[in-house]
Image (cartoon, rainbow, N blue to C red):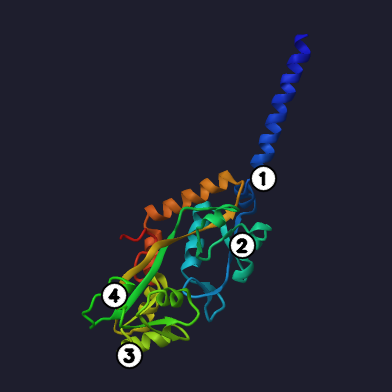
């Protein structure tokens, strides 16, 4: 009687080991390591985050971050450009391993995807002239003043939600920044990251103003659920890049400020 029971126990144990091996082999980390590459999706048309330089090579903040992450994993980065409208669907259908394209963490996305720790933090921010001694601490302080925003942007809607602001709309940031520098408007509103980049490259006499809005966005690297080994590896990679100062250096290269740390109130 003992021998059949022992056989059954051995069979159960072997089945468990086989199932464990299959599950282990199915983890994304194994696929990435065996292939020797990390397949990375991005738009490729989104400066300063990812865009093609005159020589045809991809450049940008997210490109540098993706290369650094791949290096920490011990593999080569392979970039796949795709339109934003289908980028998450492509990840879910296994066209690539990850997305590195300023994807913000949201409760809705977390239902279907896992995320690395955040590597970028941003929020809405005001911008003013350098010689303007006034301090606008919130949108309420701009009541009775002229505020420049891009037509059709989220910041246009944010500005118009506060009665009393004279909201001036423009085709894009270059136009309202020129008007701001010339004194035709009192302030402008955009994303903190974009303003840092635009100020760094525009050479206009402007300064960053107050952060506005109720919350800050956290951007991270999404990947498919069910890959615990990969999740740990990519989390460790982001943590190491923060600890050794790599993310700070990449941030300052592109924005002149460190956007890899949470924004202090």
Q: Residue 221, how many percent across, how many down?
A: 52, 58
Residue shown at the point (35%, 64%) measured from the top left: 258
Q: Earlier in the sequence, mark 2 or mark 1?
A: 1
Question: Label 1 neighbourhood size at 10 Å, few (<14), some (14-19), many (20+)?
Answer: few
The residue that mark 1 highlights is: 26
| Numbered mark located on residue 141 in the image | 4
Question: How far is disc 4 from disc 2 in space, using C-alphas?
Answer: 39 Å
Q: Look at discs 4 and 3 and give the one toward the viewer.
A: 4
Q: Earlier in the sequence, mark 1 or mark 4?
A: 1
Outermost residue toward the left? 133
Q: Are the residues tagged 3 and 1 within 8 Å (C-beta)?
A: no
The residue that mark 3 highlights is: 184
Q: Are the residues tagged 4 and 3 within 8 Å (C-beta)?
A: no
Foreground pick, 86 / 73: 86
Question: How far is disc 2 from disc 3 in space, using C-alphas?
Answer: 41 Å
- On the question of residue 75 being in view, the answer is no
Say what secondary structure mark 4 lies in. helix
| Numbered mark located on residue 88 in the image | 2
- On the question of residue 251 being in view, the answer is yes
Say what secondary structure mark 2 lies in. helix
Q: Earlier in the sequence, mark 2 or mark 3?
A: 2
Say what secondary structure mark 1 lies in. helix
Question: How far is disc 3 from disc 1 in space, using C-alphas?
Answer: 59 Å
Quarter of the view holding residue 58: bottom right
Question: How far is disc 4 from disc 3 in space, using C-alphas?
Answer: 18 Å
Question: How far is disc 2 from disc 1 in space, using C-alphas?
Answer: 21 Å
Question: Label 4 neighbourhood size at 10 Å, few (<14), some (14-19), many (20+)?
Answer: few
Q: Residue 125, how many percent across, how many down?
A: 36, 72
Q: Look at discs 1 and 4 and give the one toward the viewer.
A: 4
Residue 262 in the figure: left or right of residue 57:
left
Q: Specify the quadrant that holds the N terminus.
A: top right
């Amino acid at each position: 009687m003992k021998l059949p029971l022992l056989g059954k126990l051995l069979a159960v144990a072997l089945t468990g080991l086989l199932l464990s091996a299959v599950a282990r082999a199915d983890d994304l980390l194994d696929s990435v390591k065996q292939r020797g590459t990390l397949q990375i999706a991005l738009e490729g048309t989104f400066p300063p985050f990812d865009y093609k330089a005159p020589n045809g090579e991809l450049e940008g903040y997210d490109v540098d971050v993706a290369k650094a992450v791949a290096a920490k994993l011990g593999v080569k980065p392979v970039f796949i450009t795709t339109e934003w409208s289908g980028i998450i669907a492509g990840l879910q259908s296994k066209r690539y391993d990850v997305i590195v394209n300023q994807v913000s963490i949201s409760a809705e996305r977390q239902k279907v995807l896992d995320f690395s720790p955040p590597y970028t933090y941003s929020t809405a921010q005001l911008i003013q002239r350098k010689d303007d001694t006034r301090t606008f601490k919130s949108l309420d302080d701009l009541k009775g003043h002229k505020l420049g925003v891009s037509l059709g942007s989220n910041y246009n809607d944010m500005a118009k939600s506060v009665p009393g602001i004279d909201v001036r709309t423009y085709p894009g940031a270059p136009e309202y920044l020129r008007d701001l520098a010339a004194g035709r408007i009192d302030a402008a509103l955009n994303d903190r990251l974009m303003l840092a980049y635009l100020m760094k490259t525009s050479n206009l006499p402007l300064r960053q103003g107050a952060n506005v809005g109720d919350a800050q966005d956290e951007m991270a690297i999404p990947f498919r659920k069910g890959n615990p080994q990969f999740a740990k590896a990519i989390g460790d990679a982001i943590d190491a890049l923060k600890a050794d100062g790599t993310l700070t250096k990449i941030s300052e290269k592109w924005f002149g400020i460190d956007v890899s740390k949470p924004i202090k109130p």
